[in-house]
Image: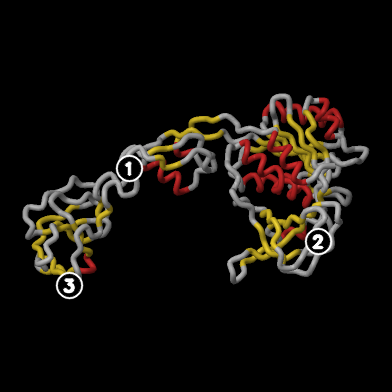
Amino acid sequence: MISVTEAEQRILSHLSPLESILLPITQLAAHILREPCYADRPYPPFHRVAMDGIAIKNDQARRHWPIQTLQKAGEEPKILSSDAFCIEIMTGAKLPEACDSVIRYEDLELRDGIAYLKPGVELKVGAHIHRKGADCAQNARLIESDRRITAPLAGILAAIGKAQVRVTRLPRVAIISTGDELVSVEEQAASHQIRASNASALREALGSLGIYDCQCLRVADQVELMRETFAQALASHDVLLITGGVSAGKLDFVPQILHSLQVTEIFHKVRQKPGKPLWFGVGKNQQTVFGLPGNPQSALVCFIRYVEPALRTLMSRKSPAYRLCAKLMTAPYTKPSQLTQFVPVRVSQGQDAALQAYTLAHQGSGDFVALADSDGVLELAEMQAFEEGRAYPLYLWQSL
């Protein structure tokens, strides 16, 4: 068996980003940008009025101005006919020619077509004007490559006229649940059967990364049927998440079947609890294959600890420069000294803004009910003992 750290390193060393594609701006949700983006012109592209009010040529001695006209946002700028007049102006409009300042309506009284400055208001040259190029110059790099496209980035791309953007193609994922005991979610389970819940949990975990192109399959513990299912999945998907059949039982056929399909085993079994039977390999066409334990906690722990970083790499998404940590707030917790242990926790925020983790009682890796109140797991490395008040790595079910 290998360590948790070595398992992560081996996985990432065998991965590289998927190819890039061009997509219209209307289809960018969750994709990773694969090109830097530049300003097509200065921003703002003109002296932009920042408040509703009047535009004037500043004269410290003047306290009232007849209103010459009104200019709305989107109109060609009007020309101030005389320093004695003003132009009513709307937020977002281009500053009228011959004007150098804006006075807010809040600082004015308008009577009989004349704008009067309220007592005590001080005039400032350039007030309430967002100057041309104040945000960025033309050709300035606004967005680096390898960024996940969020709402602010989508807005910037639209503003600079990027109707099409080069992004990483999202991975096609197959989730394959194995086991004679499994029935579909819709079926009435007999006393000796269970519903295939791992597929739903993993599909939701993929969705938190923006990956929705996944196929869920279910196959009984029959070698030829499993081989056929795995082969078809390898032919049409980038990533296989196979749950169950990777331990040491007589019917744990997954490793040998994958080997027969020319999937190279990189490692099998990690010194951790839960999730020790984890299997990882690479297909002949560079498919990424995970053999996840069948127990619900084990499958999800392995997903957030190993599968998620692997998917980030395939999507060419830079992992965060930090890893979340949380303070253990419950009594010391006994663990096997030779295994890294992942413990379900509920997370809150303390008065010092630090994350706090409270361990939850559970009946082992098959106890999926205990996860209902959990936010994620704490990781305790080999040879460590839990200490109350100490911070440990935290992995959340919902990806940040």
User: Which of the two residues, 148 or 137, is positioned nearer the viewer here?
Assistant: 137
Task: Return the residue at label 1.
Answer: 137
Does residue 88 appear left or right of residue 32 in this picture? Answer: left
Give percent across and percent down for residue 248: 90, 40
User: Which of the two residues, 198 or 57, is positioned nearer the viewer here?
Assistant: 57
Could you tell me which secondary element the residue under label 1 belongs to?
loop
Instruction: Say which mark, if any, is on residue 161.
Output: none
Residue 78 against residue 335 in the figure, above or below: above
Task: Give the amino acid type for the residue marked by disc 3 in the picture.
Answer: Lys
- How far apart are the alpha carbons under marks 3 and 2? 69 Å
Task: Give the amino acid type for the residue marked by disc 2 in the picture.
Answer: Ala
User: Which of the two residues, 48 or 235, is positioned nearer the viewer here?
Assistant: 48
Give percent across and percent down for residue 58: 14, 60
Residue 97 against residue 86 in the figure, above or below: above
Tag nearer the camera, 3 or 2: 2
Q: Which residue is at 69% across, 56% downward? A: 393
Could you tell me which secondary element the residue under label 2 belongs to?
loop
| Badge 3 vs badge 2, beta-carbon distance below 8 Å | no
Identify the image quadrant of the N terminus: top right
Residue count near mark 1 (Cα–Cα under 10 Å), binned few <14, some 14–19, many ≥20: some
- How far apart are the alpha carbons under marks 1 and 2? 55 Å
Could you tell me which secondary element the residue under label 3 belongs to?
loop
Instruction: Say which mark, if any, is on residue 118.
Output: 3
Residue count near mark 3 (Cα–Cα under 10 Å), binned few <14, some 14–19, many ≥20: some
Does residue 36 appear left or right of residue 186 in this picture? Answer: left
Task: Return the residue at label 2.
Answer: 385
Give percent across and percent down for residue 299: 76, 47
- How far apart are the alpha carbons under marks 1 and 3? 37 Å
Q: Earlier in the sequence, mark 1 or mark 3?
A: 3
Give percent across and percent down for residue 21: 52, 30
Q: Earlier in the sequence, mark 1 or mark 2?
A: 1
